[in-house]
Image (tube, rainbow, N blue to C red):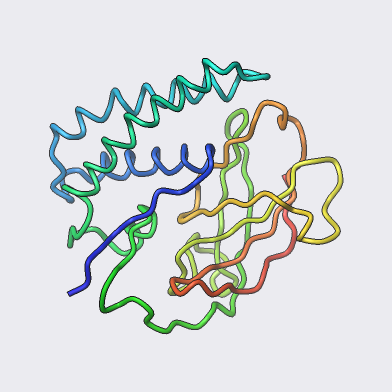
Amino acid sequence: MSKETYSIPMGIHVLYNFQRNVVTLCTDNASLWTISATKLTAIAPIHTNYELKYAIANNKNPQSPSITTARNVAWDVLEVALIDLYNHSILNNAVILPTDKDALHIHYLGENTGRPSPASITTAIITLVSEKNSMLHVIYSDSSEPNRHYKSVNVAFCELWYKVGELAPTDIANASERYNTTRSQEGIVFSPDQRGKTIYSKGRWLNKNGKYGPRSIITSA
């Protein structure tokens, strides 16, 4: 029988989106996933404190060491609570759908590891939507079904390569920033010095065997 494990992503802004996604999914599905109300009650103020410290650090330019330290300390406390939530409520929970497991960065160890799966031959269609300051929401669909906001079959996530600046990149290699999104509508948070600038991005599907599909056309916002 396969066992599940999970990964916590790297990067300040990616980490922010990851923790928000986990807490939101667990709160919205608490009854269905039989997640203890006690655990959610305990993690709520820790989550709120981290988001507050993150927002303060993200809106200060330049950042002071004390503000950055406060954010990092808040994350350390939240990380412990998230690990407890995964180990006791999320991992090997049979009622969690595969799409939600992808969003929670859950993957398998054991008999399913290395199962062959071809790279996607379809293309991600990317739209970037602004709903609040310093954040864009990534809305994607697959070229095979452009009217549905879902990943292609066997896809783990959509990888975005992007550049923030005045001029569009002439080559994707010049778009040094990367962001991985596991579901449509996830948000990318930007630093204060990037406000008011244009983002240029390309996306591609990555399947569960680490194989990439073709890149999309350049999208700007």
> Which quarter of the image is occupied by the N terminus?
bottom left
Image-based side of 105 in relation to 124, left or right:
left
As rendered, which of 188 and 114 lies closer to the eye? Answer: 114
Image-based side of 202 in relation to 56, left or right:
right
Image-based side of 142 in relation to 4, left or right:
right
> Which quarter of the image is occupied by the C terminus?
top right
As rendered, which of 201 and 4 lies closer to the eye? Answer: 4
Q: Is residue 149 positioned above or below 152 on the image?
A: above
Q: Is residue 132 positioned above or below 104 on the image?
A: above
Q: Quadrant of residue 5?
A: bottom left
- Residue 36: x and y in percent read 13, 39
- Residue 56: x and y in percent read 53, 18
Q: Number of labelled discs? A: 0
Q: Is residue 145 positioned above or below 14 on the image?
A: below
Q: Residue at x 71, y 51 (%)?
A: 176
Q: Quadrant of residue 96?
A: bottom left
Q: Residue at x 27, y 27 (%)?
A: 44
As rendered, which of 88 and 22 lies closer to the eye? Answer: 88
- Residue 195: x and y in percent read 71, 29
Q: Residue at x 57, y 49 (%)?
A: 138
Q: Residue at x 29, y 23 (%)?
A: 45
- Residue 83: x and y in percent read 27, 43
Q: Is residue 44 positioned above or below 65 on the image?
A: below
